Each structure stands twice: as structure tokens, then as C-alpha cells.
Image (cartoon, rainbow, N blue to C red):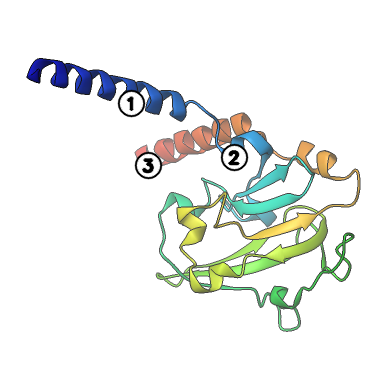
Amino acid sequence: MMAASSTSTSADMETGTLMLSAFDEYPSVVERYFRTGYKTDVNGRKHEDICILQHSNKVLVVTLAKGHPIMKDKKVIKSVSFQVTKNINRLDNKVSGKGKKGGQWVNETSPLCIITCDDNAEFTIYSCVNGKLVEVNENLLSRPQLLTEKPSTDGYIAIILPKFGNSDPQMEKLLTEEKYIENLCGQEQLNMEEDKR
């Protein structure tokens, strides 16, 4: 009786392992419903890369890219401010209705927020795309580490609605995931060569 029990437990564990490994093979929600694009060295700022996620409904989500210094150097974020200029606070953005009336218009160089890290490094995050600002992630005010813990989900920065028909052309200007990874590898190689000198 004891042997049968341990055999069935072993079989159950094997089945559970198989189920877990099969589950791991399924794409995430982001992989299933979003197309990913990357803008490198935003506004001439070396390595300050931004990731743009395009939902299947053509809405664009702005997040930090893996190669951004905040992510790469695992910086601790002290605060996020949506007061981007003396006169512009992205928290004042209010939209209504199906057409998102009242949303602030942003272009590729429009600042969305300012991130301050515990080492007092400051990073201005730009939209990198044109469109109507639908919302900024107010949760970042109380939980700024979401930016690094869950960048493509709860840690998104903003949601932007491009003009009709303009979402795909904007994504075409960005690097694909594969090209971005090649770019990061090239940067790593250059950094290693500079360190040897």
C-alpha cells in the first residue's frame, strides 16, 4: 500500500511538473496582445531607451526599456513627478467620451514625467510617439518601484491614443525586439572594448 501511494505521488509530481512546464510555454498577455517597439537614446540621451507597447486596438503604452539606466543599473526610484514644466502637469490631463476629448496632445519629444532615484539621478521620460494622452499611471506616485518591478504591466508610464491610422506607421519607426537586443549586445561589446583600453 505504501509503495502504491509513493508511486502515485511521484506520478502526480511528474504530471504537475509537466503541466507547469507546458504552462510556462504559453505567451504572456503582453506577448499575446501587444506589439513591442523600442526608441533608443531618446532625445540624444545615451542609453535612455523607451519601450512602446502597441495594443491590438492600436493604443500605445509607454514603458521603460530594459536598457534604460534605471532598469540596467537596478536603481532605486525615490519619486515620480508628472509636473514636467512650470505650466504642464500631466496629472491635469482629463479625457472624456469615446474620442477622449480634452486629452493633452503629445509629440515624440513631449516629457511625460520626471523620475528621481535615490542617488539623486534624474531622468525625464519622453513620449516618443505622437497622439492624445489618455492617462498617466498615478499609481507611480505612491509606488514608484513598479517602474522596475513590473514595467510592462502595472509599472507603465502613460497610455497614448494616436490619430486614426497613425499607430502602425509610428511603430514602424521603432526598433523591433530582435533589433533592440542586437543593439544592446553591440553596446555591451563597445563598453567592454572601452574598458580594456
Residue located at (76% from left, 56% from top): 160
Q: Residues within 10 Å of mark 2 (few under 14, many from 20)?
A: few
Q: Return the residue nearer the eye: 40 or 92.
A: 92
Residue located at (60% from left, 29% from top): 178
Q: Horizontal and vertical percent for residue 61? A: 69, 52
* Pointer 3 or 1: first along the chain: 1
Would residue 76 be found to the left or right of residue 63 on screen?
Answer: left
Q: Horizontal and vertical percent for residue 70? A: 48, 57
**Residue picked out by circle 1:** 16
Q: Residue furthest bottom?
A: 86
Considering only vertical position in the picture, is 9 above or below 133?
above
**Residue picked out by circle 3:** 195
Q: Horizontal and vertical percent for residue 197? A: 38, 39
Considering only vertical position in the picture, is 116 above or below 39?
below
Q: Residues within 10 Å of mark 1 (few under 14, many from 20)?
A: few
- In what element is the residue under mark 3? helix
Q: Return the residue nearer the eye: 24 or 70.
A: 24
State yes or no: discs 1 and 2 in contact (Cβ < 8 Å): no
What is the spatial separation of the Cα atoms under label 1 and label 2, in whole angstroms? Answer: 23 Å
* Pointer 2 or 3: first along the chain: 2
